[in-house]
Image (cartoon, helix red, strand yellow):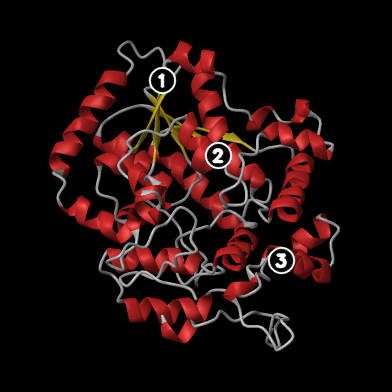
């Protein structure tokens, strides 16, 4: 039986999440902590940190801001550039399968009077990594998991820029071990524990060298390696979560960045009900679908739970939206990836079944997963959350 947080809609099967005796998950309990924080004091602390790292003679960039072109990176850039007056280098790692909307938003970000360094990995190598990640670990986002957390740090080393400004702390925003929710720094340990944990499950850490087992030459994996401790120490690199210093509110921040030209979908993003997330990444739908199969929740649950905690949705409204949008086979870009992966739809379903937690879904008397006419599964006790 799946247990759910009594306030939001997270199930107990979510990795790193605890639903406590009071019926609340880590993330919902943490909201009470956030309400007690003196955010003006935190903002002042941020200003002191930024001033400490500001280039005094203009010989280097003041900081690195990792960006995707999404709503969060637009907001990070605006805060650092417009409010605090720093000169950041915005660094973007993005997959070869960049959407048109993603491109428009990256180009819009460049209008914020900042330098933007874009990096697109070797398409063939990236494709192999995606297929390996999907078939071997149930996670087609393997290259992105590494690239977005390694390339900005590599850039910081190369340009001798010690400060990296990340966005929100995912453990605080999405719920994780409560001990890590108040962290203000993103370092190599955090990257290993959370950022590059392939598959999402609690398993042994997969290093990028593991790819050599699958026939990918290490010379093509430069973009995915975290700098050495010697390089980190030489530059004195510190990565901070902006969300530690500023109260993170996706709805308010969205209103701000839209005034500066940020573009959203005309309708909901595949796999959820919002139109402002995952606008640049075609493989995200596949990732979120397999996450739903593994753990019984997907992107719509993430979005609904955050909005419930912000008071933007009731639990009942969120549940209705989840049932409407979550758990459908992601068809929008699926044919494109199946062709590139040399994989049939039947093989795709077979691999999905391999990673499906069968205890979470309805089965027939013989124990076979029940599918509707569109081959979608149905969660157990879905009507009694």
Q: Residue at x 27, y 66 (%)?
A: 22
Q: Quadrant of the C terminus?
A: bottom left
Pointers 2 and 1 in contact (C-beta within 8 Å): no
- Between marks 2 and 3 in the image, the one whose residue lies nearer the viewer: 3
Marks 2/3: CA distance?
A: 25 Å
Tag 2 secondary structure: helix
Q: Residue at x 14, y 50 (%)?
A: 36
Q: Position of residue 298 (x, y in %)?
A: 52, 66
List the residue tagged with mark 2.
148
Q: Position of residue 95 (x, y in %)?
A: 64, 45
List the residue tagged with mark 1.
162
Seen in the picture, residue 357 relative to 89 is either above or below; the reply is below
User: Which mark, by number, is residue 352?
Assistant: 3
Q: Residue at x 76, y 61 (%)?
A: 336
Seen in the picture, residue 289 relative to 144 is either above or below; the reply is below
Residue closest to the eye, 244 or 194: 194
Residue 235: quadrant of the picture: top left
Earlier sequence position, callout 1 versus callout 3 = 1
Which class describes the residues within 10 Å of circle 3: few (<14), some (14-19), or many (20+)?
many
Residue 354: quadrant of the picture: bottom right
Which class describes the residues within 10 Å of circle 2: few (<14), some (14-19), or many (20+)?
many
Marks 1/3: CA distance?
A: 42 Å
Earlier sequence position, callout 2 versus callout 3 = 2
Seen in the picture, residue 170 relative to 255 is either above or below; the reply is above
Q: Position of residue 126 (x, y in %)?
A: 73, 43
Pointers 1 and 3 in contact (C-beta within 8 Å): no
């Amino acid at each position: 039986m799946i247990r759910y947080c009594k306030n939001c809609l997270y199930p107990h099967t979510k990795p790193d999440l605890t639903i406590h005796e009071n019926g609340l998950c880590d993330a919902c309990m943490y909201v009470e902590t956030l309400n007690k924080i003196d955010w003006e004091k935190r903002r002042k602390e941020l200003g002191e940190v930024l001033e400490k790292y500001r280039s005094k003679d203009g010989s280097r960039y003041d900081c690195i801001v990792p960006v995707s072109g999404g709503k969060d990176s637009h907001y990070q850039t605006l805060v650092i550039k417009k409010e605090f007056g720093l000169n950041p280098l915005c660094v973007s790692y993005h997959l070869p399968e960049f959407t048109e909307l993603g491109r428009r938003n990256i180009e819009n970000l460049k209008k914020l009077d900042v330098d933007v360094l874009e990096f697109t990995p070797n398409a063939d190598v990236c494709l192999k990594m995606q297929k390996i990640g999907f078939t071997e670990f149930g996670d087609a986002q393997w290259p992105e998991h590494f690239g977005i957390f390694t390339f900005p740090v590599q850039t910081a080393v190369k340009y001798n820029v010690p400060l990296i400004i990340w966005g929100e702390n995912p453990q605080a925003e999405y719920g994780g071990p409560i001990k890590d929710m108040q962290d203000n720094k993103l370092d190599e340990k955090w990257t290993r524990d959370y950022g590059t944990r392939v598959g999402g499950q609690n398993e042994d850490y997969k290093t990028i060298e593991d790819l050599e087992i699958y026939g990918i030459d290490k010379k093509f994996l430069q973009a995915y390696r975290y700098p050495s401790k010697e390089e980190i120490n030489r530059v004195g690199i510190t990565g901070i979560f902006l969300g530690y210093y500023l109260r993170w509110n996706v709805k308010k921040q969205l209103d701000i960045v839209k005034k500066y030209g940020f573009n959203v979908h005309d309708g909901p993003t595949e796999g959820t009900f919002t139109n402002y997330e995952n606008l640049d990444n075609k493989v995200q739908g596949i990732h979120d679908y397999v996450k739903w199969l593994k753990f019984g929740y997907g992107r719509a649950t993430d979005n609904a739970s955050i909005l419930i905690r912000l008071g933007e949705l009731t639990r009942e409204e969120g549940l209705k939206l989840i049932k409407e949008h979550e758990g459908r086979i992601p068809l929008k870009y699926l044919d494109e990836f199946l062709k590139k992966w040399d994989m049939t739809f039947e093989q795709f379903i077979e691999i999905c079944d391999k990673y499906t937690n069968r205890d979470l879904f309805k089965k027939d008397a013989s124990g076979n997963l029940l599918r509707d006419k569109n081959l979608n599964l149905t969660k157990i006790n879905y009507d009694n959350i």
